[in-house]
């Protein structure tokens, strides 16, 4: 059998990983359709649901049920799942003309029996983890993470981690994502901060990191530590605002690294693409991706991006507007699960975004007229 050329081998790996993404997305679609009962949860006394306590709702639910968790100024109690559930919050930046409240929780644990669960639309102040021998086919989507510990501590196989807004600004507190398993798809996430990004103890040969946007602004004056091995790393934007602008990203070995941009870094080979180490083509250094509008502020002489006030889509004049391996945009607005614009974190179900009371007074037995507008889920 003739030896595959370097480019054909890379194309084969990309094609294989796209198939993994397709299978995972089909899985997500099928479980959303197969849900049984929808239950509502709210710990806001002014907006009651069927349950006021999230752990109680989790305990009462049957496998396959969907829990809709309302926004609230109150933090929801930590939960541990032992059955397959679809748990949907409001998003981290919901439509403000209807409600500015968000669904907030500290910790979510996927325990034995929770294979196939979905967590979407939460502000997570602690982290997401799994226990026991690990769980499989977990979807973590459109959440905002902000913590100084492991944000995702995953054990098991075939997780989809996509469209999350992940903030970790203090490297002293450890890795952002720890993975022990295989067939992970991590794509269209926005990372803000400068931690060690990945900790991968074992079994990570099919990790796929795609269409990520990573902004690093580091009080320790260094670049992010990717620490990836045997992964496909493609179509990402790495954008430095502070820190050591002449530093390697400490990528491991055996990776296929293609069509990425590194901006504001003058190191000659920050992604460590070299014969016998990592393979890849199409990477560009010192190229401005040309965001539509990247808003920043300065705090203690450190430049901090204001992500939710920014528009991170690439301008039509960007030289990498269609620079992905798939011919699509680099960063979070490309690939198979492009991020929302604007970034809201709202679940991919129809959302009520305004409600108008048309008559302020109603006679006994009269009709109350309300106009409700909804936005199609995407």
Image: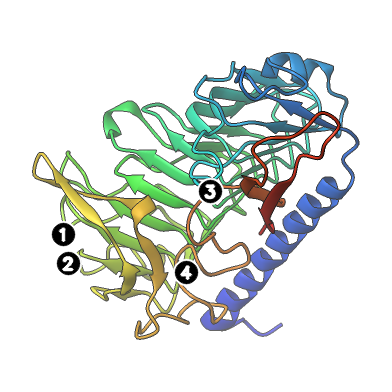
Q: Residue 235 carries which label?
A: 4
For disc 3, the marked residue is 95
Q: What element carries label 4?
A: loop
Instruction: Determine whether, in the image, residue 140 is placed left or right of residue 211.
Output: right
The mark lying in front, picked from 3 and 1, is 3
Q: Is mark 2 on a helix, strand or loop?
A: loop
Quarter location, residue 277: bottom left
Q: Where is residue 156 in the image (x, y as percent from the top left)?
A: 68, 36
Alpha carbon distance from label 1 to label 2: 5 Å
Q: Is residue 82 above or below residue 189?
A: above
Q: In this view, does 168 lie above or below 106?
A: below
- Total labels: the figure holds 4
For disc 2, the marked residue is 266
Q: Which mark is residue 227?
A: none
> Contact (CB < 8 A) between labels 3 and 1?
no
> Contact (CB < 8 A) between labels 1 and 2?
yes
Q: Where is residue 251 in the image (x, y as percent from the top left)?
A: 37, 54
Q: Earlier in the sequence, mark 2 or mark 4?
A: 4
Alpha carbon distance from label 4 to label 3: 29 Å
């Amino acid at each position: 059998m003739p030896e595959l050329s370097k480019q054909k081998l890379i194309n084969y790996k990309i094609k294989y990983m796209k198939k993994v993404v397709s299978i995972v997305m089909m899985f997500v679609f099928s479980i959303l359709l197969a849900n049984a009962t929808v239950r509502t949860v709210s710990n806001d006394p002014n907006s009651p649901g069927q349950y006021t306590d999230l752990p109680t709702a989790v305990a009462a639910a049957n496998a396959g049920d969907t829990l809709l968790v309302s926004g609230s100024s109150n933090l929801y109690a930590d939960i541990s799942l032992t059955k397959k559930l679809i748990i949907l919050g409001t998003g981290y930046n919901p439509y403000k003309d209807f409600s500015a409240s968000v669904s907030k929780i500290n910790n979510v644990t996927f325990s034995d029996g929770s294979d196939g669960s979905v967590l979407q639309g939460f502000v997570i102040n602690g982290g997401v983890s799994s226990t026991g021998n690990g769980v499989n086919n977990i979807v973590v989507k459109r959440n905002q993470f902000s913590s100084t510990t492991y944000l995702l501590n995953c054990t098991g196989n075939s997780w989809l981690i996509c469209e999350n807004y992940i903030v970790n600004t203090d490297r002293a507190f450890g890795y952002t994502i720890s993975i022990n398993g295989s067939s992970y798809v991590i794509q269209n996430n926005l990372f803000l901060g400068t931690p060690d990004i990945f900790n991968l103890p074992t079994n990570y040969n099919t990790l796929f990191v795609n269409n990520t946007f990573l902004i690093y602004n580091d009080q320790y004056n260094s670049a992010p530590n990717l620490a990836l091995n045997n992964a496909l790393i493609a179509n990402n934007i790495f954008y430095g605002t502070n820190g050591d602008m002449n530093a390697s990203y400490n990528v491991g070995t055996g990776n296929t690294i293609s069509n990425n941009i590194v901006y504001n870094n003058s190191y000659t080979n920050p992604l460590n693409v070299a014969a016998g180490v990592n393979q890849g083509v199409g990477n560009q250094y010192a190229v401005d991706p040309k965001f539509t509008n990247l808003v920043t502020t300065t705090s203690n002489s450190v430049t901090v991006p204001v992500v939710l006030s920014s528009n991170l889509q690439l301008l039509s004049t960007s030289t990498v507007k269609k620079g992905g391996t798939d011919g699509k945009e680099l960063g979070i607005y490309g690939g198979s699960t492009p991020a929302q614009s604007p970034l809201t974190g709202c679940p991919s179900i129809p959302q009520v975004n305004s409600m108008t009371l048309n008559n302020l007074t109603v006679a006994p037995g009269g009709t109350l007229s309300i106009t409700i507008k909804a936005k199609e889920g995407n």
